[in-house]
Amino acid sequence: GAQILMEIQSKIKETTRQLTNVESNLSARERERRVCELTKKELSALDPATVAYSSVGRMFVQAPLPKLTEQLAKRVTEAASEVTALERVSKKLERDLLDQQNNFKEIMSR
């Protein structure tokens, strides 16, 4: 009885922790995707011959504008696919959490 309850409680805690982690990663990837899209949009309005710089660590390196837009497009795609994967994981964790909570309630009501 008590052992099972403690097991379920620890599973609930662990799943909640994982869910919080996944959701924070999800919002970070969403933000990254949005920033890249906006930057790409701004850069696409410029003349391709415009001198542009890319940040590398704490310095800036001159880079051809078309290459920068290409890199941003790639990052947008990567972030979007990560968002999709993280949403899938998040939904699964939410289902697991709900199942665990229902199991807990069921055992408590006996």
Image: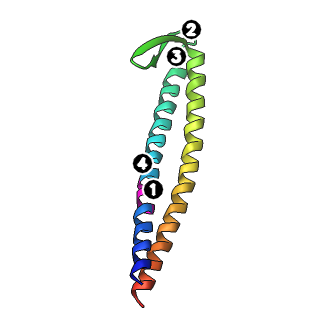
Which residue was labeled with disc 3?
46
Q: Which residues are magenta?
A: 15-20
Cβ–Cβ below 8 Å for labels 4 and 3?
A: no
Label 3 sits on a secondary structure element that is loop
Which residue was labeled with disc 1?
18
Nearer the observer: mark 3 or 1; the answer is 1
Which residue was labeled with disc 4?
24
Structural crowding at the residue carrying mark 1, measured as other residues with C-alpha within 10 Å and reported as few (<14), some (14–19) or many (≥20): some
Give the mark nearest the N terminus, 1 or 2.
1
Name the residue nearer the viewer: 8 or 46. Answer: 8
Question: In this rendering, is residue 49 above or below 3?
Answer: above
Which amino acid, mark 1?
Gln
Seen at 50% across and 73% down, the residue is 99
Which amino acid, mark 3?
Leu
Give the mark nearest the N terminus, 3 or 1.
1
Seen at 41% across and 78% down, the residue is 3
Disc 3 to disc 2, how far (Cα)? 8 Å
